[in-house]
Amino acid sequence: MHKGHIQRGRAGEEQAAGFLEANGYAIVCRNYRNRFGEIDIIARHEKAVCFIEVKTRQSCDYGRPAEAVYAIKQRRIVRVATQFLKERGWLEERVRFDVVSIVLGQEPARIELIRDAFEAEPEV
């Protein structure tokens, strides 16, 4: 991955974390990794465990950042989340999948929170 993309992603995650905390989210962990992949932010909000994907772009020239959370990425996030819940003994918790979309090319950056951006598809 290009160094500029990594720096932009980190800057976006920092802004997303601050935005989420300001909106009542209690961050449990950031950049959680397991054998299935990574989740940017895991937080508690309104009695739910929220798995949050952060997408950061410099502009919307190629679409809104949140549009990059394709079905394949969603399935990977669900697998990572399931493993996290098992590890913590939280399988009975209410779960939500949110996306934070950030466009940095403006002052101030445009931040959009999409609650319940997608649902976990049952395994077939």
Image: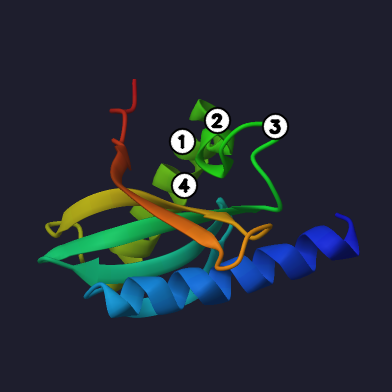
Residue 49 place in picture, x, y as percent = 23, 63
Q: Amino acid at mark 1?
A: Arg
Q: Position of residue 37 (x, y in %)?
A: 58, 53
Residue bearing the label numbered 3: 62
Q: Which residue corresponds to mark 1?
A: 75
The residue nearer to you, when weighing 95 against 25, is 25
- The circle on residue 72 is 2
Q: CA distance from mark 4 to mark 2?
A: 9 Å
Q: Is residue 11 left or right of residue 20?
A: right
Quarter the C terminus occupies? top left
Give the mark nearer the N terminus: 4 vs 3. Answer: 3
Instruction: Tell me the mark number nearer the camera, choosing from 4 and 3.
Output: 3
Q: Is residue 105 left or right of residue 118?
A: right
- Reply above or below: 52 against 43: above
Residue contact at pointers 4 and 2, CB within 8 angstroms: no
Chain-order first, disc 4 or disc 2? 2
Badge 4 crowding class, 10 Å Cα cut-off, few under 14, some 14 to 19, many 20 or more, is many
Q: Amino acid at mark 2?
A: Ile
Q: Amino acid at mark 4?
A: Ile
Q: Residue 106 location in percent, x, y? A: 63, 59
Check contact, mark 1 vs mark 2: CB within 8 A.
yes
- Label 3 Cα crowd, 10 Å radius (few <14 / some 14-19 / many 20+): few
- Amino acid of disc 3: Tyr
- Say whether residue 89 is visible: no
The disc at residue 77 is 4
